[in-house]
């Protein structure tokens, strides 16, 4: 078991919250103002949290037969530095990844010159990039707040790209070896790999976008599916591999 938390060396300055607004885009500079409701605290911007677990069990079932099992798990999350969100750090999306790996292995020595190995393994890998895991989370707000006019720094708003990707690989491997003599050996091997890839990239939109008068205070997150929109890239494929 290993756990590590790293706050990095780059910090933000929380002057703004995600629901703040500014009016620096107005032609009349006397009307320029910003709500600036942040607590002015320093916030680490390039953070990472890592957890890993490893376990292995190995024993002889009978004479000449050995069995082993291996399991590992890792859980990682991190936030990268984004200069444009230096004063609004809570609007950044984070990256997340966890992996489950399981392997079972059987070694059987039939004779001192003839033996085989059977190995089954599974890797389940999940990765995501988002501010909230649920794309319809009510904490998402109107893009009216996402404004960096003038300074180049966002004075509110959130990153709205949302990615979830799951990859599962199941591997079956069999190797048979016969040591015919000191100079010659014969080997037979079979390998099969089944992949399952489920990819969901979506951009979170406003359900009321496109109405004649769009109220910046009226917002409900909405995502689209299928391949008929530029706001989503969703697919699931299950390729197979085999070799002998």
Image: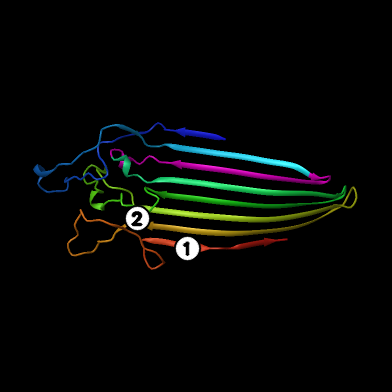
Q: Relative to residue 207, is residue 66 drawn left or right?
A: right
Picture coordinates of residue 212, whole percent (x, y): 18, 65
Picture coordinates of residue 87, whole percent (x, y): 28, 38
Q: What element carries label 1?
A: strand
In which image quadrant can residue 15 be found? top left
Residue at 30 percent of width and 48 percent of height: 158
* Label 2 crowd bin: few (<14), some (14–19), many (20+), radius 10 Å: some
Q: Relative to residue 84, is residue 46 drawn left or right?
A: right
Residue 69 located within the stretch drawn in magenta: yes
Q: Relative to residue 244, is residue 79 drawn left or right?
A: left
Start-end of magenta stretch: 61-87
Q: Residue furthest right?
A: 181
Q: Which residue lies furthest to the bottom in this view?
A: 228
Residue at 80 percent of width and 49 percent of height: 108
| Residue that carries the numbered disc 1 in the rendered image | 235
Name which of mark 1 and mark 2 comes first in the sequence.
Answer: 2
The colouring scheme, among rainbow, by chain, secondary structure or one colour, is rainbow
Picture coordinates of residue 152, whole percent (x, y): 26, 43
Q: Is mark 2 on a helix, strand or loop?
A: loop
Which residue occupies the foreground of this view, 5 or 178?
5
Residue at 54 percent of width and 42 percent of height: 74
Q: Relative to residue 103, is residue 132 drawn left or right?
A: left
Q: Distance between the residues labelled 1 and 2?
A: 19 Å
* Label 1 crowd bin: few (<14), some (14–19), many (20+), radius 10 Å: some
Asked if marks 1 and 2 touch (Cβ < 8 Å), the reply is no
Residue 117 located within the stretch drawn in magenta: no
How many discs appear?
2
Which residue occupies the foreground of this view, 96 or 70?
70
Picture coordinates of residue 125, whole percent (x, y): 54, 50
In which image quadrant can residue 153 be found? top left
| Residue that carries the numbered disc 2 in the rendered image | 136
In which image quadrant can residue 29 be found? top left
């Amino acid at each position: 078991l290993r756990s590590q938390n790293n706050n990095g060396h780059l910090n933000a300055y929380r002057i703004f919250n995600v629901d703040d607004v500014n009016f620096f885009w107005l032609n009349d500079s006397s009307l320029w103002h910003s709500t600036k409701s942040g607590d002015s605290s320093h916030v680490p911007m390039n953070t990472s949290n890592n957890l890993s677990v490893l376990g292995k069990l190995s024993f002889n079932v009978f004479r000449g037969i050995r069995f082993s099992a291996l399991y590992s798990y890792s859980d990682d999350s991190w936030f990268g530095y984004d200069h444009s969100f230096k004063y609004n750090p809570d609007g950044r999306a984070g990256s997340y990844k966890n992996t489950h790996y399981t392997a079972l292995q059987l070694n059987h020595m039939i004779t001192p010159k003839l033996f085989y190995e059977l190995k089954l393994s599974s890797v389940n890998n999940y990765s995501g990039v988002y501010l909230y895991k649920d794309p319809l989370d009510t904490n998402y707000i109107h893009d009216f707040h996402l404004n960096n006019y003038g300074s180049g720094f966002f004075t509110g708003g959130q990153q709205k790209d949302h990615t979830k990707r799951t990859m599962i690989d199941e591997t079956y491997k069999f190797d048979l070896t016969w040591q015919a003599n000191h100079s010659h050996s014969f080997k037979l091997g079979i390998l099969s790999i089944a992949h399952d890839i489920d990819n969901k990239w979506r951009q979170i939109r406003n359900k009321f976008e496109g109405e004649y008068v769009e109220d910046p205070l009226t917002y409900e997150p909405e995502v689209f599916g299928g391949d008929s929109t530029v706001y989503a890239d969703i697919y699931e494929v299950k390729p197979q591999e085999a070799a002998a």
